[in-house]
Amino acid sequence: MTAVLLAAGLEARNPGVSAGGDDKASPPGQGKGGAQGAQGAPALPGLSSTAVASTQLSGLKVAGQKAMTGYSREKFTHWTGQGDSCDTREVVLECSGNGVKRDAACKAVSGTWVSVYDQRRKEFANNLTRPQLLVVSAATSRAKGDQGPEDWQPPAKGYWCTHATAWTNVKSTYQLTVTEGEKKKLTEMLETCS
């Protein structure tokens, strides 16, 4: 498997599996992401407190599910340069990983990432200040697909609080609506916060 960054999430190796052929497991969450998130994963940038997420959630407009007409994953491939020959994808991979080594073109060639699961498209897909970009396994990314929290939750229940907080923060930032089912599940997941 190769590490691949997705809009609203990252696809990476299974937890504790290194890139570049080194199968030694490294301690999870020891990347450059700063404060530790749930289960030892690096904290997500811009993640609010549970109280702020609860307030944001109560302020979101409830609307019916809209058709996915016009959706295409290819529309979310707008990585922009972040300096030193690196694009947003490579910066997120380095910040979220442990022991990340890059080649001369800034491509991650080895490292370890922790899988924590898994409009303005260009801005959204490259925003390093909001919590929508994270490392997850390819299997989890496929399982989640385009499902919202009412239909999919991270398999690690200990990450529900962070997932719901991040989801709500992003919805609020981009002034998106929520369905009744989505809001109910987000409320339930926020109640797991300690």
Image: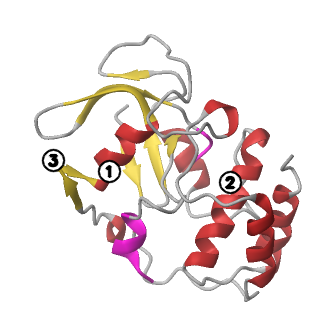
Q: Position of residue 138 (x, y in %)?
A: 48, 41
Dot 3: element: loop
Say which quadrant the N terminus sits in: top left
> Can you say whether 7 is above or below 159 in the image?
below
Residue at numbered disc 1: 89
Q: Position of residue 72 (x, y in %)?
A: 40, 71
Residue at numbered disc 2: 163
Q: Are marks 1 and 2 in contact (CB under 8 Å)?
A: no
Is 48 a magenta residue? Answer: no
Residue at numbered disc 3: 84
Residue 100 location, quadrant? top left
Residue type indicated by callout 3:
Asp
Sequence-wise first label, 3 or 2: 3
Mark 3 is surrounded, within 10 Å at the Cα level, by few (under 14), some (14 to 19) or many (20 or more) other residues, namely few
Mark 1 is surrounded, within 10 Å at the Cα level, by few (under 14), some (14 to 19) or many (20 or more) other residues, namely many
Residue 80 location, quadrant? bottom left
Residue type indicated by callout 2:
His
Dot 2: element: helix
Dot 1: element: helix
Taking the image as shown, residue 128 lies to the left or right of residue 40, namely left
Sequence-wise first label, 1 or 2: 1
Q: Are marks 3 and 2 in contact (CB under 8 Å)?
A: no
Q: Which residues are magenta?
A: 116-126
In front: label 3 or label 1 = 3
> Can you say whether 95 is above or below 123 in the image?
above
Residue type indicated by callout 1:
Arg
Q: Position of residue 186 (x, y in %)?
A: 79, 64
Sequence-wise first label, 3 or 1: 3
